[in-house]
Amino acid sequence: MAVLVTGGAGYIGSHAVAALQERGEDIVVVDNLQQGHKGALLGGKLYVGDLRDADFLDTVFKENEIDAVIHFAANSLVGESMKLPGKYYHNNVYGTLCLLEKMNEYGVKRIVFSSTAATYGEPESVPIDEYDRTLPTNAYGETKLAMEKMMKWFDVAHDIKYISLRYFNAAGAHDSGRIGEDHHPETHLVPIVLEAALGKRPHISVFGDDYATEDGTCVRDYIHVSDLADAHLLAVDRLRGGADSAVYNLGNGQGFSVKQVIEIARSVTGKEINAVIEPRRAGDPAVLVASSDRARKELGWNPTRSNLENIIGSAWSWHQSNPEGYDDKK
Ligand code: UFG
């Protein structure tokens, strides 16, 4: 039996494919390569195409014996989602609907879903747990919440069990140094700081230093991408073991401010890294820190790579060896 990984050539998807490969799973990857890179695949049989193409998905489900799906394929830029919500509803929500309908048609009953802390919006209290209010402040988070809710009703009606994993801030790169983060455009803090360290950017812009936090900059919970990948394997195992549907936060439980991230990056890279304070970015909550107790208890998840020096160190190795990212560019 194979695991189907949608969006498997993307940043987090490719790390999950690597982890599945390491434990000898049969892997089928579906990716339209709009964001993903062929060069990011360390395993799996790749089908290039889009979830919204029914004939394409028929081919994938007919040619493979799939028993579980890990669903990453989605657009994920908060800023873009505020300008182009239709793109997010079409690709994320409608794409997921197409996938669930095909899963139902072919009798595939397990799905692990790539969700986000953006489903919570501005938290009422931190650390955030899975029972907290979900009130997204951006269209991206709203579409991910809609996708979770869709899965709930496919469970009720068709017994398709889901585990939704709400990530906090993914960063870092694979231990092998062969895969890492390569987005176009890049909007995430850690890779941007490292691009500044490499001299590819003149400085890092700090978006606001007047938040109600200790140093005035936003606080986030950074989690190593391979720790995230591990959680997907545990979730597949749990569903294969007959568990019920569930939602889990995945974070490290510790918050770091933008200024602290830059400071640690200076020490890890030995580079100066100029920082310039700029206005706040729309839609940024001041503090996002996870309680991942539930994932630790129920999934047996134990993140081991997520101290921030280690996260930034692994990303730095990748950036130094691949300053232009993947050379296939698709
Ligand atoms: N930041 C800067 N300068 C930059 C880039 C980012 O100051 O050049 C700041 C942001 O304002 C934010 C922090 O660094 O305060 C982290 O920003 P990222 O863009 O790296 O990450 P976000 O927290 O905005 O978003 C990430 C994912 C989302 C997900 C969210 C959930 O990209 O998909 O985490 O926590 F929804």
Image (tube, grey):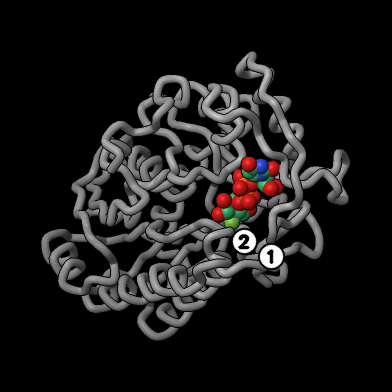
Residue 118 numbered mark, or none: 2
Which residue is at 51% across, 77% downward?
149
Residue at x 28%, y 67% (from the top left corner)? 51
- Vertical placement of residue 18 versus 285, above or below: above
Residue on which the image places disc 1: 121
Closer to us: 186 or 169:
186
Q: Amino acid at mark 2?
A: Ala
**Residue 158: image x %, image y %?**
35, 82
Marks 2,1: beta carbons within 8 A: yes
The quarter of the picture where residue 238 lies is bottom left
Instruction: Give the left or right position of residue 262, taking residue 46 as reference.
Output: right
Place residue 130 in its image quadrant: bottom right
Image position, residue 67 (x, y; %) = 27, 61
Which SS class for mark 1? loop
> Depth check: 248 or 166 in front?
166
The residue at the point 68 percent across, 39 percent down is 205
